[in-house]
Amino acid sequence: QVQLVESGGGLVQPGGSLRLSCAASGSILNINAMGWYRQAPGKQRELVAHITSGGYLNYADSVKGRFTISRDNAENTVYLQMNSLKPEDTAVYYCNADIDTGWGPINNYWGQGTQVTVSS
């Protein structure tokens, strides 16, 4: 069984920074794309940032220049460094990954989510 566990959320003032981590564990042969999504109250879940196994990056326009996604393939971990945070960044942040367990097709997995609140 594969699990994605996020950490690093919390309460921060506008202009502050947070770093989210997401570690994948279990029966993992290879991890392809990894990403971060977020969902604010009353809104749909949206892509924040995405990184492929080859290092190709994609960001939502609203976070470009402020957020940085990275990954440590040896540790099966993806990070999201969030700087210059704004109140509109407040949401539950979810980790997502396409994982090959070596058993059957590549499946898509979600973490349980971590709350990020930006408020003074």
Image: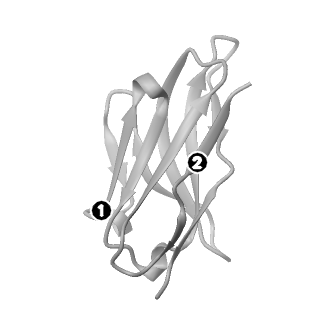
Residue 16: which numbered mark, if any? none
Q: Residue at x 45, y 40 (%)?
A: 78
| Camera-nearest residue between 107 and 73 | 73
Q: Position of residue 23 (x, y in %)?
A: 55, 37
In the displayed structure image, the side of residue 51 where residue 109 appears, left or right = right
Q: CA distance from mark 2 to mark 1?
A: 22 Å
Does any portion of residue 52 appear in the rendered image?
A: no
Residue that lies at the very extreme toward the right in this rendered image: 1
Element type where label 1 sits in the image? loop
- Colouring rule applied to residues: one colour
Q: Nearer the viewer, mark 2 or mark 1?
A: 2
Q: Residue at x 56, y 51 (%)?
A: 7
Mark 1 Cα-neighbour bin, 10 Å: few <14, some 14–19, many ≥20: few
Q: Which residue is mark 1?
A: 64
Q: Position of residue 97 (x, y in %)?
A: 55, 36
Residue that lies at the very extreme toward the left in this rendered image: 65
Q: Which residue is mark 2?
A: 6
Q: Is residue 17 above or below residue 23?
A: below
| Camera-nearest residue between 75 and 99 | 75
Q: Is residue 79 above or below residue 109?
A: below
Q: Are the residues tagged 2 and 1 within 8 Å (C-beta)? A: no
Q: Is residue 114 above or below residue 4?
A: below
Does any portion of residue 56 appear in the rendered image?
A: yes
| Camera-nearest residue between 61 and 118 | 118
Q: Amino acid at mark 2?
A: Glu
Q: Residue at x 63, y 11 (%)?
A: 102
Residue that lies at the very extreme toward the top in this rendered image: 102
